[in-house]
Amino acid sequence: MGLDWLFSPEVRAATDQLGRIALFCLIALLAYEWIWGRGRDGKKTLMDWKMGALCLFFLSLVQRPLLMTAIFLSLMMLVPGYAGALRPLEQQYFWALLPAFVLVDEYLHGRAHLFAHGKRPRNPILKKIQSFYRVAHRPHHQIGGNDGRGELSVTHTYVEHWGWWLSLPNYWFGLVCLYFGLIETFLWGTLVKAVWGMHVHTNWGRSYDLALLNHPNAVVRRAMNALCHVLVFPNQHHQHHSQSRNSASNMTNFIALFDWLLWDTLVIEKERPVVYGWRQTAKEENSALYRFFNTDLSRG
């Protein structure tokens, strides 16, 4: 098996189900933002909508299928005959494999994200790689215009440069697991992360975590603060998208333990960010196509 496994009914059903549920959640959260006016008064601009549509189109129809095919073909050449080999193991140990998958996936994502935001490495090769990651990640932090009114939205969950989705190691990891037969693990692990990621990017206004962090009852405040050391809640990720020193903090989307215990990048604030996003530094960035396709590493 190889490409036969890629197009097998089991794999296609899992990837189709993942896409349907993720799309439903995206539409539901967009409806919430629209009903409560979270995109009015410059909070969300036409450019935000253009980037959301462009990135969703390429992610669904180009990047994910391309990456999936490339990884399956590579593994078919490197380890022929092992496509789907771990399917029996998953059927026996699914509930142990699922949290392990999520933890590894989240660590790989957070570590690459930290590298993109980190200090310049001395090694010239690593410096070039980091420049690419920075250019690829920049569109994700460009919110609204330069007027400071833009706010984070659920559509920013998947807004990235074309190279970001193809170069993140956690995407490779997930598809390698899928190749070896961990279908349900891949489906539910990826889905949990995707839905939680949408939820932390959504413009909730004053989100529930802020209400609990500022609750009059001290026990409730401490309990919520403790939970923020384990999981990422909306205001933690909104702080990452702020124009402040907190933009170099809270590198994960789901598991806060890595920020807290490994990287010392955990920040828990009790108010919303004042200003979001990164300022546009070139007139070319007024184009969605430029933001998505730009490969000028001198800007990284």
Image (tube, helix red, strand yellow):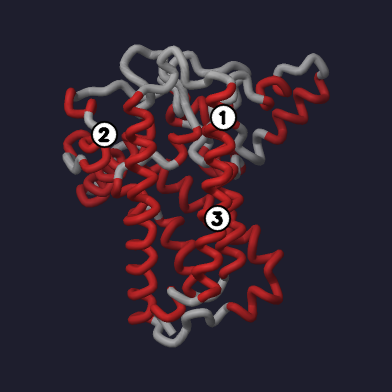
Cβ–Cβ under 8 Å for marks 2 and 1: no
Which residue is denoted by mark 3 in the rendering? 190
How far apart are labels 3 and 2 at the CA level?
27 Å
How far apart are labels 3 and 1 at the CA level?
21 Å
Residue 106 image position (x, y, % from top left): 53, 50
For residue 292, side relative to residue 296 (left or right): right
Q: Residue at x 63, y 24 (%)?
A: 207
Q: Residue at x 29, y 49 (%)?
A: 163
Q: Residue furthest bottom?
A: 81
How far apart are labels 2 and 1 at the CA level?
27 Å
Which residue is denoted by mark 2 in the rendering? 288
Instruction: Tell me the quadrant of the picture where the C terminus can be found.
Output: top left
Q: Residue at x 33, y 62 (%)?
A: 66
- Which numbered disc, 3 or 2, marks the residue that appears first in the sequence? 3
Residue type at the position of mark 2 = Ala
Q: In the rendered image of this protein, does residue 64 appear above or below residue 289?
A: below
Which residue is denoted by mark 1 in the rendering? 236
Residue 273 in sight in this render: yes
